[in-house]
Amino acid sequence: MYSIELKQESIMLLSSTHRAEIYRYGGLLNCFEINKIDGNWWNVVDAFSSPADARANLINGFHSAKLSPYACRMRLGKYEFSGKSYHCSKHTLGKHAIHGLMYDANFVLEQSHHDEHQAWVIIRADYMRDDVGYPFNYQLKIKYLLDESGLSITTEAINTGKTALPIMDGWHPYFTLGGKVDDWTLQINSTQQLEFNSELLPTGKLLSDERFQAAYSLKNVQLDNSFVLKNHEVASCVLQNQALKFSIFAESSYPYLQVYIPPERDSIAIENLSAAPDSFNNKMGLVVLESGEIQVFSTRYVLQNQ
């Protein structure tokens, strides 16, 4: 049997084997837990301690952040669209805009349902036009669905304005299996990554990288790369240690997988992206959404005991 717990600042989806916690702040996933063989629960998400912690510290690493309408770096925060020039500056890293404009949005509950087979919620937030560099109207709806196949996360981007708009979508979760990444393995359904320049902006070229075709040890591996997924017929990636196996099944709406290992090496960011970093300029995967149109982005997380 599945159930839902609704709180003022968070939502829990529960089953006997798995639990997922969603914060209304940011619409972010703060917890995806499994009941381990020893009876203890393990959260694979490198989580905040509370919604207040998320509000205070989200921009310090953007853990679990919703990335919209752009993700990763936008060169100098500038782009052109429909013959006009724009400059986004809500959050910058060095001289580049980074991680979009909706990461701190407050989402409201639109629908919820649970029965013996599933539990799901739909949350909603409107872009408040709080950056003059993106003067467009749109809305995000996020559906979190917990069932026997895992935790599915589906985002709808809806153009609520009267003019077309550029958009991409992504997530920025950090995952942990316990201990250090050096004791984990990673498999990615990719043989190519985007070539980045020294500022982590794509050059437009692809580089061959076949290291992760099979489970590959992360011992001493440094990663801050964007992989191009081969297809969406199998898991996009599998992260595992001796006790746990975590898989991500991205649909074709997320053709890129950004992977980053922070200096602490106790977690790994694995980010579904619908387009390449700086897509507002390089157009790699960028979607142009006409008035009234909806674009859907979907991924699924699976957490298993070994």
Image: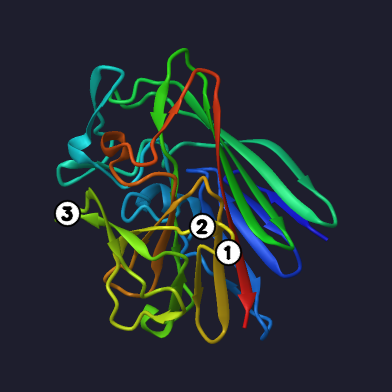
90 lies left or right of 43: left
Q: Are marks 3 and 2 in contact (CB under 8 Å)?
A: no
Q: Which residue is mark 3?
A: 197
Left or right of 249 in this view: 228: left
> Marks 3 and 2, how far apart in space?
26 Å
**Identity, as a three-letter code, of the amino acid under mark 1:** Val
Label number found at residue 192:
none
Tell which of 142 and 283 is nearer to you.
Answer: 283
Task: Determine whether, in the image, residue 18 is placed left or right of residue 199.
Answer: right
The mark nearer the N terminus, 3 or 2, is 3
* Residue 213: percent from left, percent from top: 44, 74
Residue beneath disc 1? 234
- Left or right side of 298 for 117: right
x, y (%) of residue 219? 33, 83
Mark pair 3, 1: CA separation: 30 Å
Decide: is 173 above or below 100: below
Q: Secondary structure at mark 3?
A: loop
Percent x, y for residue 287?
Answer: 43, 33
Label 1 residue SS: loop
Marks 2/1 in contact by CB < 8 Å: the verdict is yes
Image quadrant assignment for residue 258: bottom left
Pointer 2 residue: 231
Instruction: Residue at 58%, 64% (x, y): give it.
Output: 234
Screen quadrant of the C terminus: bottom right
